[in-house]
Image (tube, coloured by chain):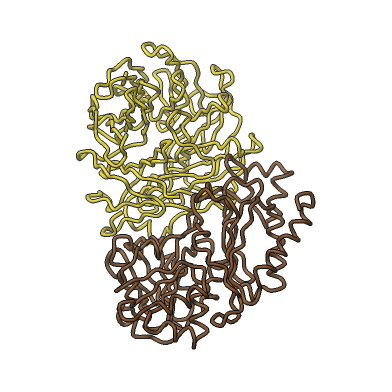
Amino acid sequence: MPGDGFLSDLRAKDPISRLFAGSGTSPFGQPQRRPRGTRIPVSIVTGFLGAGKTTLIRALLDSPEGADTALIINEYGEIGIDNALLRASSDATVLLGNGCLCCLARSDLQETLRTLFADRARGVVPSFRRVIIETSGLADPGPLLQTFASDRALGQEFHLQALVAVIDAPNGVRNLASAPEAREQVALADRVVLTKTDLADPSALLTELAALTAAPVDSAVNGAIDPAYLLEERLDLPARVVPEHDHAHAHSPGIDSFVVLFDRPLKWSAFEQAMAVLTALRGADLLRVKGIVAVEGAKGPVVVHAVQHTAHRPIELQAWPDDDHRSRLVFITRGIGKAEVEALFAAVASIVNPTSA
Amino acid sequence: MPATDNSMIWNFKLLSHNSLDGFGGIGEGMSMQLAKDGRRILWLAHESAPKNFTAVDVTDPKNPKIVARRDLPQSHMRSNSLETVGDMLAVAYQTKEPGLKPAGFELFDISTPEEPKSISFFDCSGPESRGVHQLWFTDGKTIHMSSGAPDFSPSHAKDDQFYRAIDVSNPSHPSEIGRWWLPGQQRGDNEGPLKRHPGGTDSGFRPHNTNVYPERPDRVYMGYLDGGLIVLDIADQAHPKMVARWDYHPPNDGFTHTVVPFFDRDLLVVSDECVRNDGADWPKLVWIVDNRAEDNPTPIATCPMPPVDVFSRRGGRFGAHNLWENLPKEGCYKSDQVVFGTFFNGGLRAFDLGNPYQPKEVAYFVPEVSGAPFGSCQLNDVFIDDRGIVYTVDRFVGGLYCLEMDF
């Protein structure tokens, strides 16, 4: 397995490697049909108080597609009015109907998720098929993302499927201007949901959002939106590539979001080492890196995801999601530019593989 | 899967459920015929009388249809095991007591699935025989089975069945071409009497599954109940020789059931059968065995089980039973990466074997069965076709569940 030299070495030399072998395995393990493999998908919904998270989630849980969902309301000590609306209790799991359940994570989200996983195996709670985490308004999604990034935490059992930022048309521009958390929520999101567009003209907000994120933006009135938009993982990154914006503009101080494309397959060692340099030198500023990589020798694309210093285990997919077989990586950084990243990858590639440089 | 009942389902999609018209108790014979007209017919052996077998058209797994069904000729017998090859069906017959008839196996022509026609009956009855418990039939020529015989005198009544190979290349006249039993199993053997398992845990020394694969046509992989795992060399079919044995009981209760080799990985996947209710014989496990040294099979892991404190109280049996055996036949699914097994009230479970030292559960299906005699499902066997459709059956009333792998 990449990053796991021990196993790679075993495969190369020792008869015990046969025990690990088998038809169809690649250096990345058994290729998966989808990035989550067999893990439980998690959608995280962020957004300021009053942005409409609860309305959105409630509508989803009432829909056929939202059946069998475990909802976790992630609280940091205080109970907001949103929770009262959802009938959450402080210490128990509440059944919501439609196979759904709800519980409150007051302090330790990992503990809550572990308990839910164990209770599900015991048949104590309904056999939920996904988890939705509703964060409190001011939450910085960064630590949440890290929770799912490593196997030591929850990465073995749970997979981050989508980070959704909810922002409302009447207050969105003001929140983005006044609260760094709001900008961070949008910048890190896989997709943005615009709410209350019937109450205010969203055009100014849309301009702000376009400057802040490469993620797709869709609107929901009274919670109505395609459930897949909230629940499914999308790999069609070019579709959501932002028009290259100049990184100096006024509304995203410090946060950069850009896409890097590679036309030719990369050597895994080159990718790994370039990322290692970035992580070692600027890990704290590497807010999120995600995408699919065409790796030399791998049949399918390799899904990668890193959050600051932590990198997910790479997953090879059985097939590409579309005809575009280029590597596509979204970088969300604090003060690391596209040109620097591209130069770094080029430099590492030329050292790893001088003939093709 | 509707969320309105207490079924547990993960990474499978339930496509359909058919309670088989009130006769939903299925044993451990499941075999798919690819009929000449293009249909996929799943042949199911019933757990107990009055039904012999039921054939279900699963061409559309969302809409399975019963196309044929037969009753047993006697109520003191069961079929339990069957296999199809092409348009031939072999059904095992075991009687409740030694000395009864019919005990043996019957061959049918199923070229018209609606009208199975008997070709022949191979008689295994005898004063100390109950006939055939299980048969393996994948090449159209040889049936490898666990059977008694009229000329076999077990040293203990529970040891009446042994390994027999029957040539059925002329289906009208099957004939025995080889047999083997654990030394000491027959009265008069030079070896001393086999050491019985204590008290109520004596299940006997006899084979359950007798698997032979084209990758190693010279090997039979057997679960030998209280005798553990036994591998035979049948290069000389008339004179089988034991090449490996792994006996891990005691300390565990016996009843080793199935041995599935993963040839490219030098692994054996071994299942026990749980035979007592309410966790009385826990743990009954699926074992991962390192088979690099063929004469010294070495266990390296077990598949993780659902919590025993919960499941042992759900009613009926809780523990391992049948595995998907990578049947070497057209139309069958094959994997040496994922292990599928049935665990009675633990349902159907799948385990990723990417790291053989740490099998990881990746999918499960535990249906809520209405009218279940012990209050819980008792999933008994599993069959997987080359479309990735997974079929599992309940031992008493639940009938047939058709699922899709969602991973």
Q: Position of residue A102 (x, y in %)?
A: 35, 72
Q: Position of residue A280 (x, y in %)?
A: 71, 71
Quadrant of the rendered image containing residue B50: top left
Residue A173 in the figure: left or right of residue B23: right
Query: Which residue is nearer to you in this view: A215 or B47?
Result: A215
Query: Which residue is nearer to you in this view: A231 or B18?
Result: A231
Which residue shows up at 39% across the image and 53% down it?
B279
Which residue shows up at 33% across the image and 43% down it?
B402
Rendering colour (chain B): yellow
Quadrant of the rendered image containing residue B190: top right
Residue B110 in the figure: left or right of residue B246: left
Which residue shows up at 38% across the image and 77% down it?
A202
Residue at the farthest left position:
B21
Q: In the displayed structure, would residue A180 be above or below residue B287?
A: below
Q: Quadrant of the N terminus of chain B?
A: bottom left
Whether residue B63 is visible: yes
Q: Position of residue B34 (x, y in %)?
A: 37, 27
Residue A156 in the figure: left or right of residue A17: left
Quadrant of the rendered image containing residue A77: bottom left
Rendering colour (chain A): brown
Q: Position of residue A301 (x, y in %)?
A: 57, 51
Whether residue B251 is visible: no
